[in-house]
Image: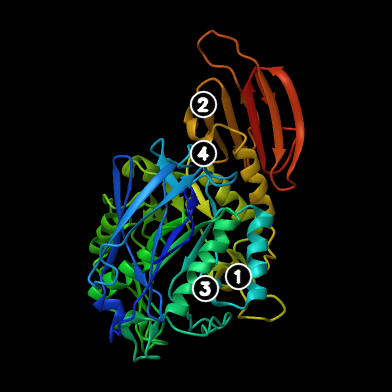
Amino acid sequence: MKISGEKVEKWDVFEVELISRKDFTQPFEEVELSACFMADSTIKKVNGFYDGNSTWKIWFMPEMTGEYKFRIESSNDEFDGLEGSFHSIGASPGNHGPVRIDKKYHFSYADGTPCFIMGTTIYAWTYRPQEIREKTLESLKKNNFNKARMLVFPKYLAGFDEIDLTYEPPMLPYEGGKHNLDYRSFNVEYFRNFEERVKDLQEIGTEADVILFHNYDFGMWGIDDGLSDDDALFYLKYLIARISAYRNVWWSLANEYDLYKEADGSGFRFKDNRRDWDRIGNYIMENDPYSHPRSIHECFRIYPDREWMTHVSCQKSNTYALMMDLKHRYKKPVIDDEYRYEGNLSYGWGNLSAQEELMRHWLSVMAGAYATHGECYVVGGNKKDIFWTYGGKMVGQSAPRLKFLKEVITELPFQEMAPAHDRADGCEKFCLSKAYDVHLFLLTDNCTEREISLGFPDGIERKYTVTVYDIWNCSIVDQVSGVTYYNASHLPGMLVVKAEKI
């Protein structure tokens, strides 16, 4: 038995490596492996996984400091009963732990630090060449995105003349080759590469929103059509064992769970029972040792509320009124993970202007919710290297302005603010407030009534410091102090007005 070290940082990964002298025909199925980790009065059981070359591993994320002891249980008597220990030390700067649901509608890290989620989409970036991956990570860092939606299985999209999403991964997730896949024999190199990409995101502070199933590959590999629900749970057991110890993991059951593409290319159609999604969701809830965030993404019908859902994921263009409604109905955080993409395609889902992309994201935030950006530009006639699927370098204009959005919001007590409909019309003027202390107003391009009353009709005079932001040019355009009223009529364009009580 080999362990990663005697000291491991809190919320980092502790590793046990085991090498067997026995030969197994089906090592993924024949060997059961788990370990119980004990610290103080807590006990946590995690599964191990086969990593090829007669090697099994157990990965564990300590969630407290101090001494941990562990004992291994296995159907292989070489491993069964082995024991060990390690010491968990304090987290280093930047390591805030996994994301948790907080204050009903929001997210915070395990150490209590508020987490303002601002995501983007890079479905199949994981198997592109290293040079492209490095550009992807640089784009995320540069624009301060802290969540990335990404597929486990490869992506293939046909039938759209303007794009050509046909890159094949250098290997498939299963042994056996196309249409002859062995769903009980994983290609460890494929999953090793995937977990390395999760680790890359963790190193830059970005959550990996791992999309577990993709319901249409146009018959390219046979992954979706051949994978039974039992095989799906077998895959989930393996994937959870491999990557759940990374603190930045989220689980998304599917990308468009209710959309299905026939293998013969005959067309997309609605099919919400393509898999037993509740069985899958409950399995993850019951078997993820660390209770990472869980959701399911739709095309047409937002999935009904379930215990296994920690938050709502949707794709809708109405990013204000609908976000308000979903928060009310689900009593959970809401992320509009696809409000359509900025791009130059003719398809409705990929042709938002940068201004539209920016406004839809801001409107989601003004509803006290969250959103995910995407970028679909064909550049120089290159129909394949499109950021929203394959990553690379961002070229759109909304991303740096979303970075500015995040800078403005994270200076506020966002988790304590709520939409204030009595202070704005909810059409062209929007307001978030924390009682009398802080107000945030969003004025659209079309807003004509730009007068803002900061006082409350309770007879108490309160004075405010007002900061006005031009959210397109990412600049402060006015600041005044000691006022109870502000008139922004002299300032055109999309504005955000912050008022803080003195």
| Sooner in the amino-acid sequence: mark 2 or mark 4 | 4
Residue at (32% x, 72% y) in the render: 235
Q: How far apart are marks 2 and 4 (CA)?
A: 16 Å
Amino acid type for the residue under numbered disc 4: Pro
Relative image position of residue 291 (x, y in whole percent): 35, 51
Label whose residue precedes the other's in the sequence (3 or 2): 3
Q: Which of marks 4 and 1 is nearer the N terminus?
A: 4
In the rendered image, which quarter contains the C terminus? Answer: top right
Q: What element carries label 3?
A: loop
Within-10-Å neighbours for mark 3: few <14, some 14–19, many 20+:
many
Q: Mark 1 points at which residue?
A: 391
Q: Distance between the residues labelled 3 and 4?
A: 29 Å
Q: Is residue 336 left or right of residue 277?
A: right
In the picture of the structure, the residue carrying the numbered disc 3 is 124
Residue at which label 4 appears: 114
Asked if labels 2 and 3 touch by Cβ distance under 8 angstroms, the answer is no
Q: Is mark 4 on a helix, strand or loop?
A: loop
